[in-house]
Image: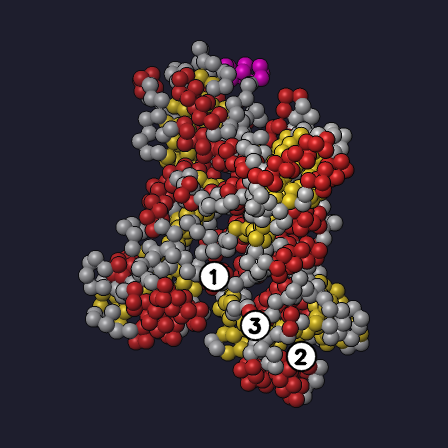
């Protein structure tokens, strides 16, 4: 695959380990003086370690060489990148291919790499960040290994290579060490990149969420001013550090000293909150940056594209993290921070839930409901238009803050969903991550020609992300709060079996229905458990499931019943449904009270449904600080338990691994793609021959076929391919044809030369103006018709789809999707998710299909999707699955010109 040079790559911004924003870009001719100054500023010792000597002439020669080609030589054989902070070059990294001293290092897929970092920027991750970006450029150019020579005493550079996360080997030769770094991407490298990204992100958010000083710019004198409301919240909330206001028309607002401009402030604010008119935002942001502010919250709405671009440019130029614009603000309720930079009606209640939303209204609703439950918020961010700080940043903050035990998200868009998925997958194993799945309507469905693209709805794509990342996705704010109350207060269930306990039989039936509809099960109780339960309960009780404890049950009897069920091992959760009765009122019993007696003794979750409860959900508190969730309706409780059970099942699975596809011919596949796009620069659908070749490069099983451009060739092909059934299929073809059956371009069960000849003649007459030939295939043995495919989503990247196939695939819409690359667990989930899955495992006595072959098909499609970013769509329909194998009968591929994009490369939005 042809390499890409840095001349056609835009610069990016990324975070150093201390949270500083650095600009990573190709070196240019104009950088020579700055590069030379970097070398000149190095101590004699560091200069010796870099150049194996202290000659300043070596530094001059290095500056001349590296700045001679504006970033790189032809086809990516030579590349040089610089890290720039505040318009100063603080580091440089370069590689040159084929220049080593041994045959291996002289190979075209090997490059020698060199690094240099300004002395005052050591230990901030400059070299590592540059190397990550250089590795990405090298991979694109076909480089497989980096080599580097270092003095054995140069411990720092040797540590940089060792800690990179890539497979590294060393060979000692006297005072020198020859290092070889293998550039293939593997999980250890991605994990190392994740950890470096988390450290950098958390450091960059400190001025935002733990500022030592805050300035509110645009705090007005009128009571209705948004800036004034933010200022009052900060002051009245007890922000313990320096607080200033900026307004050229006032000396004091809400008891806070006011200054005419940011430049006039007596001290530099860590955080500036901007509540100025939209046209003023870029100028004020620039002023904040020049003053040394490190973070901005822009509550102003209505910025046009130019104003938004200028705002973000100022933040990048001065290294400020940005929340907003068009947001409600941020908060951190920690006692030593007490930051409430919002204009919500009420201050966020302190607690342990992290909340990040794009909609300020949703944020207010979540904060109010969390406060009512007594859960409260650890920190809150209204992200608004989300120019910079994202849900990914907040997840990493909550993962590290030592306080947050629950993460709630409302995200209407994703900047880098694949990076978000990796972060969420890691965080969700430590704390539950919940979201509202917003934007599920059909209006979001994008028009597409192929079955695969039509199946890949925005809802399906988001669900794939949430499922793989272990995120609990709910359909409403109410459902989110219902589930949050349960997972916050109770242990996760280890399965889906539930015992329903009620003092009113009819309500127990409704609760059982709600549980079943939510995907839970109500198991039968064994005779010993039934006997023990009847011994606990009053006369007339029923000990089947649901358990009818009767209206005569006492507090102690109910407690004994719940304790027995929660500890018996037969069920995974207990749902107690209670209605108020005259009997309980007469005896003074409060049947909800036993649920709060030492609930910590239960290792299984217990939830209540209180029919007379006015609020949708509340937490019944105990004396020791524990709680039991109580719902107003059984459907709420069942839904929350079902979400918790699915999340527990996800957590119980070990982290999946991406299986190796040993015989994939990636280079051969790329050659097919390059050849097509060279001839068709705008892309398009492949003809049958290159399409079959492309799938063949990945070992994807296809039915034998032949191409025929006239009826005689069709007859000859049929005689050769007829197979044991003696029959063939004939499929007309012309460029752009997708759904052959819908336009009548398929003839099936053709037997003998006369039928084949007649069928070809009929097709050629019907489609005489467009038909270029026909595909001849043997009739396949009967089996289950499935559908598999790939879609390259512009935001989410490659998805693999699977489901029921055949001509009704679009009508039945029985599909599932997962983001590639697929792990072994993803493949299993993908096969079992569609409604048709029982057919594959031998429904009603039939034998299972070749499940291993089906898994291999999906894994090979996943590898293909990751290898070939130009693959816009791949459609395999039908795929016939039988006990003796899996075969694709019809395949289509659409290619578009698209460059590789590494979603895990560290960079800001």
> Left of 355 or right of it: where is 806?
right
Tell which tag, 2 or 1, sits nearer the viewer.
1
The part of the chain drawn in magenta is: 526-535
- Residue 870 vs 613, above or below: the answer is below
CA neighbours of label 1 inside 10 A, class few (<14), some (14 to 19), many (20+): some
Q: Main secondary structure of the magenta part?
A: helix
Say left or right for 148 vs 308.
right
Give the labeled residue for mark 2. Answer: 50
Q: Quadrant of residue 373?
A: top left
Q: Cα distance, mark 3 to mark 2?
A: 27 Å
Residue 161 place in picture, x, y as percent: 67, 67
Q: For label 2, count other residues whose C-alpha is less than 10 Å away and answer few (under 14), some (14-19) or many (20+).
A: many
Numbered mark located on residue 7 in the image = 3
Which residue is the site of mark 1?
909
Q: Secondary structure at mark 2?
A: helix
**Alpha carbons under labels 2 and 1: distance apart:** 33 Å
Which residue occupies 47% across, 18% down?
Answer: 547
First-in-chain label (3 vs 2): 3
């Amino acid at each position: 695959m042809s390499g890409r040079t840095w001349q056609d790559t835009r610069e990016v911004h990324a975070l150093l380990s201390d949270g500083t924003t650095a600009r990573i870009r190709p070196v240019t001719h104009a950088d020579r003086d700055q590069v030379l100054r970097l070398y000149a500023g190095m101590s004699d010792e560091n200069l010796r370690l870099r150049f194996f000597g202290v000659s300043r002439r070596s530094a001059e020669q290095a500056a001349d060489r590296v700045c001679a080609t504006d970033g790189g030589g032809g086809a990516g054989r030579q590349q040089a990148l610089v890290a720039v902070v505040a318009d100063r070059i603080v580091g440089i990294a370069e590689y040159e291919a084929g220049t080593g001293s041994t045959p291996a290092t002289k190979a075209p897929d090997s490059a020698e790499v060199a690094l240099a970092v300004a002395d005052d920027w050591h230990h901030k991750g400059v070299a590592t960040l540059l190397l990550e970006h250089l590795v990405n450029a090298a991979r694109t150019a076909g480089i497989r290994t980096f080599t580097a020579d270092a003095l054995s005493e140069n411990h720092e550079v040797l540590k940089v290579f060792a800690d990179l996360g890539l497979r590294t080997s060393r060979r000692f030769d006297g005072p020198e060490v020859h290092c070889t770094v293998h550039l293939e991407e593997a999980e250890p490298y991605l994990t190392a990149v994740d950890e470096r990204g988390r450290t950098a992100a958390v450091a960059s958010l400190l001025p935002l969420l733990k500022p030592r000083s805050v300035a509110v710019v645009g705090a007005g004198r009128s009571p209705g001013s948004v800036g004034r409301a933010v200022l009052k919240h900060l002051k009245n909330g007890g922000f313990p550090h320096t607080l200033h206001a900026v307004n050229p028309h006032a000396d004091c607002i809400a008891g806070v000293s006011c200054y005419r401009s940011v430049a006039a402030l007596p001290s530099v604010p860590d955080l500036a909150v901007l509540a100025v008119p939209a046209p003023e935002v870029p100028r004020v942001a620039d002023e904040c940056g020049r003053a040394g502010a490190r973070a901005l919250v822009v509550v102003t709405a209505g910025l046009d594209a130019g104003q938004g671009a200028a705002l973000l440019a100022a933040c990048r130029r001065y290294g400020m993290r940005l929340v907003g614009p068009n947001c409600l603000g941020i908060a951190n309720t920690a006692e030593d921070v007490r930051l409430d930079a919002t204009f919500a009606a009420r201050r966020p209640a302190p607690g342990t839930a992290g909340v990040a939303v794009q909609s300020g209204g949703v944020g207010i609703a979540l904060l109010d409901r969390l406060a009512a439950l007594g859960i409260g918020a650890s920190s809150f961010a209204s992200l608004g238009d989300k120019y910079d700080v994202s849900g990914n940043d907040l997840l990493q903050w909550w993962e590290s803050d030592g306080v947050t035990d629950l993460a709630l998200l409302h995200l209407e868009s994703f900047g880098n969903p694949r990076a978000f998925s990796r972060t969420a997958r890691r965080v969700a194993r430590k704390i539950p991550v919940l979201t509202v799945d917003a934007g599920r309507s059909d209006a979001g469905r994008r028009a597409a020609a192929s079955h695969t693209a039509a199946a890949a709805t925005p809802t399906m794509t988001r669900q794939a992300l949430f499922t793989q990342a272990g995120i609990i996705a709910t359909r409403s704010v109410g459902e989110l709060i219902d589930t949050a109350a349960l997972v916050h207060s109770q242990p996760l269930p280890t399965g889906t079996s539930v015992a329903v306990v009620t003092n009113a039989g009819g309500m127990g039936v409704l609760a059982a229905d709600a549980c079943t509809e939510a995907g839970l099960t109500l198991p039968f109780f064994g005779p010993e458990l039934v006997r023990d339960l009847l011994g606990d309960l009053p006369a007339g009780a029923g000990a089947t499931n649901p358990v009818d404890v009767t209206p005569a049950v006492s507090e102690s009897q109910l407690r004994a019943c719940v304790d027995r069920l929660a500890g018996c091992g037969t069920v995974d959760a207990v749902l107690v449904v209670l209605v108020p009765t005259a009997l309980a009122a007469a005896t003074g019993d409060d049947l909800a009270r036993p649920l709060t007696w030492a609930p910590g003794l239960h290792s299984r979750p217990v939830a209540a449904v209180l029919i007379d409860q006015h609020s949708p959900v509340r937490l019944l508190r105990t004396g020791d600080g524990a709680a039991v969730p109580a719902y107003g309706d059984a459907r709420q409780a069942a839904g929350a338990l079902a979400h918790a059970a699915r999340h527990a099942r996800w957590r119980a699975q070990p982290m999946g691994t991406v299986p190796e596809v040993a015989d994939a011919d990636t280079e051969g596949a790329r050659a097919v793609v390059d050849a097509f796009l060279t001839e068709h620069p705008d892309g398009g659908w492949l003809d049958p021959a290159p399409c079959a070749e492309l799938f063949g490069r990945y070992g994807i099983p296809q039915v034998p076929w032949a191409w025929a451009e006239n009826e005689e060739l069709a007859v000859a092909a049929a005689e050769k391919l007829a197979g044991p059934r003696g029959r063939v299929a004939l499929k007309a073809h012309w460029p752009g044809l997708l759904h052959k059956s819908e336009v009548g371009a398929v003839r099936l069960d053709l037997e003998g030369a006369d039928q084949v000849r007649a069928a070809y003649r009929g097709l050629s007459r019907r489609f005489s103006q467009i038909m270029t030939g026909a595909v001849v295939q043997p009739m396949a043995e009967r089996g289950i018709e499935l559908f598999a495919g790939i879609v390259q989503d512009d935001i989410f990247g490659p998805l693999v789809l699977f489901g029921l196939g055949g001509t009704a695939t679009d009508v039945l819409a029985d599909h599932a999707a997962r983001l590639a690359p697929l792990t072994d667990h993803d493949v299993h989930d993908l096969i079992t998710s569609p409604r048709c899955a029982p057919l594959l495992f031998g429904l009603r006595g039939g034998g299972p299909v070749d499940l291993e072959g089906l898994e291999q098909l999906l894994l090979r499609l996943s590898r293909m999707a990751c290898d070939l970013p130009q693959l816009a769509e791949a459609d395999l329909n039908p795929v016939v699955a039988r006990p003796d194998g899996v075969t694709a009968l019809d395949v289509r591929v659409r290619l578009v010109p698209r460059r590789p994009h590494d979603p895990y490369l560290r960079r800001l939005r």
